[in-house]
Image: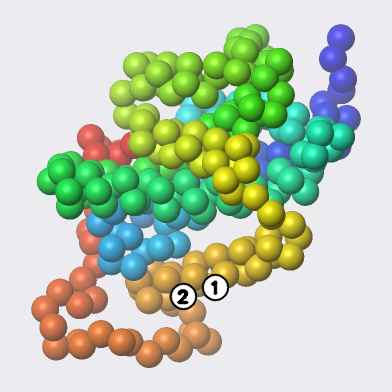
Amino acid sequence: MGKPLFYEILEKPATSCVIGLCSVIWFYIQKKNIGYSHVGLSYETAVEGHHWRIITSAFSHISVVHLVFNMSALWSLGAVEQLGHMGLGVAYYLHYSLVLVVLSGLLVLGSYHVLINRFKIEYFRRVTAVGYSCVVFGWMTILSVKQPSSKLNLFGFLSLPISFAPFESLIFTSIIVPQASFLGHLSGIIVGYSISWGLIHGMNNYWAVSMLGWTALVFVISLKQSGAYDFGFLKIESVTDPTLPGNGRMLQMSSLLDAHDELV
């Protein structure tokens, strides 16, 4: 018989908070009937200065099934918080979750940029991605390197060897859910390997707080400049010429999920 849920929550405080946050955001989006294209990440909106979408897209989910799948996997991966004796633990989990959110989002945009401008694949210009899967796949990858003998449990009954989970899940989701973002999941895996192999390292409380502060600053400024939210107390001088055509243009996107929207 397993431990009571209360004790598991105490053992995975950061994971529990993230799951709670994603669930509250999902409920709010459903309650307010907010279109996912209004919070998702796409190349076209990023070019227009909607950099805040890197954060909002990560914590927004497209449906209850999407939410449950990601949060079920994340709950299992929360075992990282209990591995302080291996150099992991709660602080490590928080530090590198932030890294995964930001760098995975940037890598997705970088991939879109190459595909659009180098290979002329215009499809990716308006692809809109939402979901926490980039981070989930990143932690799958880190755990597969740090503790390859562990298992990934999904929905309480499906168990996968963690050593194969990243690529098994990548292929599985691409086949079962055609709208799943292959690039988003792959970006999480790449950043995950970069962290677990030490290519990205040195995160401590100082750098985590600094990164969080800069991320919050960029979030607020881009939110203000894009016109998505009006911060009355924040005044930002424009550095563009208002006489040039196209300035201030706002992308109008459907609030419904269409063929260009992807789940991550």
Residue 217 — which label?
A: 1
Q: Secondary structure at mark 1?
A: helix
Looking at the image, residue 151 sits to the left or right of residue 68; the answer is right
Between 229 and 79, the one nearer to me in the picture? 79
Q: State which quadrant residue 15 falls in.
A: top right
Is 113 placed above or below 142 here? below
x then y, percent, for residue 163: 60, 18
Is 238 placed above or below 60 here? below
Query: Mark 2 to mark 1: distance in Å?
Result: 6 Å
x then y, percent, for residue 95: 68, 51
Is 157 placed above or below 166 here? above
x then y, percent, for residue 207: 68, 63
Residue at the spot x=49%, y=26% of the render? Answer: 65
> Can the viewer see residue 255?
no
Q: Are marks 2 and 1 in contact (CB under 8 Å)?
A: yes
Residue at the spot x=42%, y=43% of the render? Answer: 130
Residue 151 — which label?
A: none
Q: Assign the C terminus to one quadrant of the image.
A: top left
x then y, percent, for residue 12: 79, 36
Looking at the image, residue 244 sits to the left or right of residue 34; the answer is left
Amino acid tagged 2: Ile
**Residue density around tag 2, few if under 14, some if 14–19, many if 20 or more, within 10 Å:** some
Amino acid tagged 1: Leu
Label 2 belongs to which residue? Answer: 221
Looking at the image, residue 243 sits to the left or right of residue 258; the answer is left
Looking at the image, residue 244 sits to the left or right of residue 238; the answer is left
Count of all numbered marks drawn on residues in the image: 2
**Residue density around tag 1, few if under 14, some if 14–19, many if 20 or more, within 10 Å:** few
Residue at the spot x=38%, y=46% of the render? Answer: 108
Residue at the spot x=17%, y=48% of the render? Answer: 118
Q: Secondary structure at mark 2?
A: helix
> Can the viewer see residue 208?
yes
